Image (cartoon, rainbow, N blue to C red):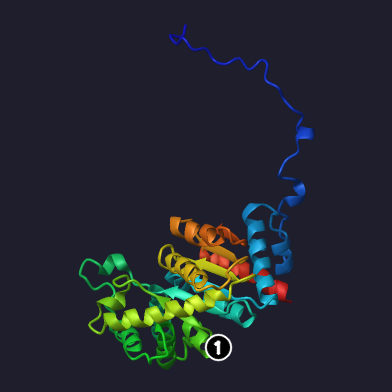
């Protein structure tokens, strides 16, 4: 016999409802369809489930298509991982098709892009080289990126200066794999946003804090102008930056509104394999408070999700 004074609640009088009358949010019409060998990509995409993230992906693609049609800005905010997993050709192709009007990135994205363009490889084994202090000590990377920043002319920000340097230094065998080389040749704005000490070129003897601050601040002002173009239908995508770009983007939103410009009814999207605090609040939620529009969060590996989104857009372009 139980020692408790409490007795389990009697469920005998519980009321039930008919399953058939209740209905539900999921129906077989929404289910995925098996892929058939030889079927075109458009069929595969159309056969994805009409549920949750698959539908969100379609909605994001639709917002991008609408932004292109209405000639509103489409800005990609990038972390270094996007470059490391080989997405530069995808992003440049999207730019050629009208789905990217500018790139904003943290410092690590420029490092990986430079190394790919010049040497054809990047992403050192940090655990192997950290014990002896040689992590981030590649001479060419530190020298050339700091030279670009230090030699920037008064009308250039960090992004444009680095793009120009990469274009000058790129090995012809690897140039087409560089996002910054491709953006420069297309005259697409690139802005770079750094925090001192976060990037390996800051440990190089050629690093100049004044030049780093000046050129990155120039780029923040340029990004604010780019963000102004999101009003009434633009799209901002944060891909792979958990801290720097979400913080920079939110400040840009505030600056634009502070200066009296309308910034309403636009779309924001966060792509990452984990949904972090800052992208969730600074990209997906806060920009739309009392301003219309909507933010989306899609969780998954960049090397799968971005080509999948691009495929939907390219198929829709045909």
Question: Which residue is depicted at the point 63% across and 65% down?
Answer: 265
Q: Is residue 151 left or right of residue 16?
A: left
Q: Nearer the viewer, residue 170 or 96?
A: 96
Residue 210 position, x and y percent, is: 28, 82
Q: Quadrant of the C terminus?
A: bottom right
Dividing the picture into quadrants, the one containing residue 42 is bottom right
- Residue 117 vs 237, above or below: the answer is below
Residue that extends furthest to the front in the rendered view of this protein: 260
| Left or right: 75 as drawn, with respect to 52 | left
Q: Is residue 120 above or below residue 284?
A: below
* Labels in figure, total: 1
Q: Count neighbours of disc 1 (C-alpha within 10 A) and say few if under 14, some if 14 to 19, many if 20 or more.
A: few
Residue occupying the point 45% across, 56% down: 276
Q: Which residue is mark 1?
A: 186
Q: Nearer the viewer, residue 161 or 177?
A: 161
Q: Where does residue 170 sit, x and y in percent of width and height?
A: 43, 89
Asked which secondary structure carries label 1, the reply is: loop
Relative height, residue 298 to residue 234 (above, below) = above
**Residue furthest toward the top?**
1
Give the percent coordinates (x, y) of residue 259: 50, 74
Residue drawn at the location 49% of the way across and 70% of the way down: 258
Residue 164 at least partly seen: yes
Q: Residue furthest left?
A: 132
- Which is nearer the eye, 140 or 153? 153
Residue 273 image position (x, y, % from top left): 49, 59
The one nearer the camera, 160 or 44, is 160
Instruction: Inspect this view and state whether residue 300 appears.
Output: no
């Amino acid at each position: 016999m139980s020692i408790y004074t409490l007795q389990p609640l009697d469920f005998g009088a519980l009321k039930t409802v008919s399953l058939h009358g209740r209905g539900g949010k999921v129906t077989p019409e929404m289910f995925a369809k098996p892929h058939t060998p030889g079927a075109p990509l458009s069929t595969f995409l159309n056969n994805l489930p009409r549920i949750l993230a698959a539908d969100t992906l379609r909605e994001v693609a639709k917002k991008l298509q609408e932004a292109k049609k209405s000639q509103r800005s489409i800005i990609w905010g990038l972390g270094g991982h996007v470059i490391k997993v080989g997405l530069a050709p995808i992003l440049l192709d999207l730019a050629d098709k009208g789905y990217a009007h500018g790139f904003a990135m943290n410092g690590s994205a420029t490092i990986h892009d430079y190394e790919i363009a010049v040497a054809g490889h990047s992403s050192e084994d940090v655990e192997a080289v950290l014990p002896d202090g040689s992590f981030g000590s590649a001479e060419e990377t530190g020298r050339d990126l700091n030279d670009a920043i230090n030699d920037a002319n008064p009308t250039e920000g960090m992004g444009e200066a680095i793009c120009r340097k990469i274009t000058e230094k790129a090995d012809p065998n690897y140039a087409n794999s560089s996002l910054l080389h491709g953006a420069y040749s297309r005259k697409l704005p690139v802005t770079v946003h750094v925090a001192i000490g976060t990037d390996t070129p800051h440990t190089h003897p050629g690093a100049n804090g004044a030049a780093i601050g000046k050129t990155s601040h120039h780029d923040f002002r340029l990004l604010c102008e780019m963000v102004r173009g999101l009003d009434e239908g633009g799209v901002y995508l944060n891909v792979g930056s958990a801290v720097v770009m979400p913080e920079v983007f939110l400040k840009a939103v505030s600056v634009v509104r502070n200066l009296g410009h309308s910034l309403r009814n636009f779309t924001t999207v966060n792509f990452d394999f984990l949904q972090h605090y800052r992208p969730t609040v600074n990209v997906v939620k806060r920009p739309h408070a009392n301003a219309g529009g909507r933010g989306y969060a899609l969780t998954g590996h960049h090397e799968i999700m971005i080509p999948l989104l691009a495929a939907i857009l390219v198929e829709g372009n045909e």
